[in-house]
């Protein structure tokens, strides 16, 4: 991210805030369905109680099951296919061993219950770490996305997946090229990723460089927040002279 594009002009700050509001509006419109986070504590609904066929240790199957569970909102087969760089037909074939009729419609969201997620984790080989790494890299390359729902998801959940993944070279490169509009990045997201990076440093120069990058972004975010408050105070003063 080029920090030189961050202007000190209060008017520019207001433009950034309008962009942020626009992004939030897109997110609301693209997530109107009653989604629930994909964790054991917050399962998908309704429950699906058919028999689960354990897989034979296929890495692709393990990754795709991991993606289904790691997604923060229920994904469709089409969306999983975009993350995994596979055709929807291939995703259907691989996941049919475990999820059966749940994946008949590639455009429908996969709604898993708490019981089903628990049973998958108990009986199947699931690569959650690889799934988070793949989702994090996918989110961070949001400039390549053409689907509004994907863009909204990436904007809100890139840090969640990053902070639960392994620090692979691919993920570190994606973080280096972080391209989200700065106003869409929260302080909490920057802090989560910074803490995650520090927990994985261990003399890794690539990780250290990203720590420096994200600590700098945190400093800029702090300055931006202070400037935004001053800008709004200035506007309030101007409006007071109009009354």
Image: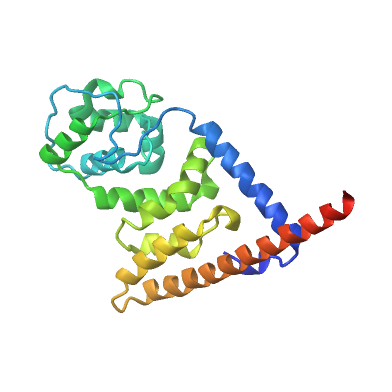
The quarter of the displayed image where residue 48 is located: top left
Q: How is the image coloured?
A: rainbow
Seen in the image, is 167 located left or right of residue 50? Answer: right
Residue at 72% in and 57% down:
232
Residue 153, percent from left and from top: 46, 42
Q: Residue pushed farthest right?
A: 242
Seen in the image, is 124 located left or right of residue 43? Answer: left
Q: How many marks?
A: 0
Residue 202, percent from left and from top: 28, 76
Q: Is residue 22 visible in the rendered structure shown here?
A: yes
Seen in the image, is 237 located left or right of residue 6? Answer: right
- Taking 139 as reference, is 146 above or below it? above
Residue at 34% in and 64% down:
196
Residue at 30% in and 43% down:
70
Q: Is residue 147 visible in the rendered structure shown here?
A: no
Q: Residue pushed farthest bottom?
A: 203
Q: Quadrant of the N terminus?
A: bottom right
- Taking 45 as reference, is 151 above or below it? below
The quarter of the displayed image where residue 123 is located: top left
Name the residue nearer the viewer: 62 or 158. 158
Residue at 60% in and 55% down:
183
Seen in the image, is 234 located left or right of residue 48? Answer: right
Residue 103, percent from left and from top: 30, 24
Residue 141, percent from left and from top: 48, 51
Name the residue nearer the viewer: 220 or 101. 220
Name the residue nearer the viewer: 186 or 175. 186
- Taking 151 as reference, is 2 above or below it? below
């Amino acid at each position: 991210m080029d920090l030189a594009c961050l202007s000190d002009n209060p008017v520019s700050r207001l433009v950034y805030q309008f962009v942020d509001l626009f992004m939030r509006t897109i997110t609301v419109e693209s997530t109107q369905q009653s989604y629930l986070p994909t964790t054991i504590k917050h399962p998908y609904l309704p429950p699906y109680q058919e028999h689960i066929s354990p897989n034979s240790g296929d890495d692709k199957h393990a990754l795709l099951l991991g993606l289904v569970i790691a997604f923060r909102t229920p994904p469709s087969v089409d969306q999983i296919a975009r993350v995994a760089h596979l055709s929807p037909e291939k995703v259907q074939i691989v996941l049919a061993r475990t999820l059966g009729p749940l994946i008949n419609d590639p455009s429908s969201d996969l709604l898993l219950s708490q019981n089903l997620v628990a049973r998958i984790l108990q009986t199947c080989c699931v690569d959650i770490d690889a799934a988070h790494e793949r989702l994090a890299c996918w989110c961070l390359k949001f400039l390549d996305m053409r689907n509004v729902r994907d863009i909204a998801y990436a904007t809100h959940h890139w840090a969640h997946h990053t902070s639960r993944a392994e620090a692979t070279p691919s993920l570190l490169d994606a973080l280096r090229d972080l391209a989200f509009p700065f106003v869409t990045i929260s302080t909490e997201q920057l802090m989560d990723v910074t803490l995650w990076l520090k927990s994985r440093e261990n003399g890794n120069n690539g990780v250290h460089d990203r720590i420096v990058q994200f600590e700098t972004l945190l400093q800029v975010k702090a300055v931006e927040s202070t400037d935004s408050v001053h800008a709004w105070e200035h506007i309030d003063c101007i409006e007071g002279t109009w009354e």
